Amino acid sequence: MKRFFIFILLIVLLPFPGNTARIISMFEIARWYLDADLVLICSAQETDTMLICHYDSLKTDGFRLAYDQIREKYHISIDSVLKRSSDVKGLPQTVMTPVFTVNLQEYRIDKKRFTGWDEHGDSVFLNQVEYRGNVGDEDTWFRIGKEKRVVILRHTGQDLVIDYAQVCDEHVLRLLSDVEHYGEAFFNPLH
């Protein structure tokens, strides 16, 4: 009976792996802005995707975990500069994302269904493969699209790496203006 309940629980829970998109707070955006080396309003003209590594493992319970780690390079068109540190000389033509994961979880179930016997009297099974989940990493806050975006960047060695990117709208511009005005006092709820 216990195995029956576990089986029913697995059938109910497997289609819903439980991963959700991370919600970014205004305090995180404020911290990225204050620590930024460069903040732009820009759009992507072209994107190059670089595969860092591929991971694929079949677990003992019949589930498969498969994902890729990638990094994206954006060739950008700059509309305006909202903030620039003295370390940034000139304006970049390209910016990079940090390494992130895609196809983070892909559950694979192999089912064998008995179909009869062959001419030698051996059992014949039909192998069925079923995929569930296929949840990607939701780190979309550093990806740039064709529309204008506010992009917060920091220097890491030779690259300018995206910490945060958001569609350019009045809400995010007002938030960044407040952070610029208040500085560290922005984090004090009594400012």
Image: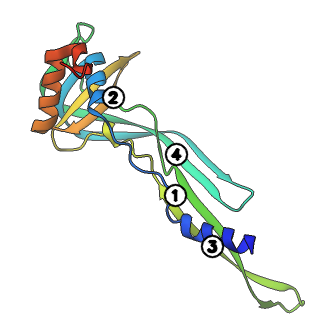
Residue count near mark 3 (Cα–Cα under 10 Å), binned few <14, some 14–19, many ≥20: few
Position of residue 105 relative to residue 186, above or below, is below
Sooner in the amino-acid sequence: mark 3 or mark 1 = 3
The Cα–Cα distance between marks 3 and 2, rounded to whole angstroms, is 42 Å
Q: Which residue is mark 3?
A: 8
Image quadrant assignment for residue 93 = top left
Badge 1 vs badge 4, beta-carbon distance below 8 Å: no
Residue 113 in percent (x, y) is at: 71, 82
Q: Which residue is mark 1?
A: 17
Residue 131 in percent (x, y) is at: 56, 66
The three-letter amino acid code for the residue at tag 4 is Asp
Image quadrant assignment for residue 145 = top left
- The residue lying at 90 percent from left, 89 percent from top is 120
Q: Nearer the viewer, residue 107 or 190?
A: 190
The Cα–Cα distance between marks 2 and 1, rounded to whole angstroms, is 27 Å
Q: Which residue is mark 4?
A: 68
User: Which secondary structure, mark 1?
Assistant: loop
Position of residue 151 relative to residue 129, above or below, is above
Q: Nearer the viewer, residue 171 or 59?
A: 171
The quadrant of the picture occupied by the N terminus is bottom right
- The residue lying at 23 percent from left, 7 percent from top is 86
The three-letter amino acid code for the residue at tag 2 is Asp
Q: Which residue is mark 2?
A: 163
Foreground: disc 3 or disc 2: 3
Sooner in the amino-acid sequence: mark 3 or mark 4 = 3
Sooner in the amino-acid sequence: mark 4 or mark 2 = 4
The three-letter amino acid code for the residue at tag 3 is Ile
Foreground: disc 3 or disc 1: 3
Badge 3 vs badge 2, beta-carbon distance below 8 Å: no
Residue 8 in percent (x, y) is at: 62, 73
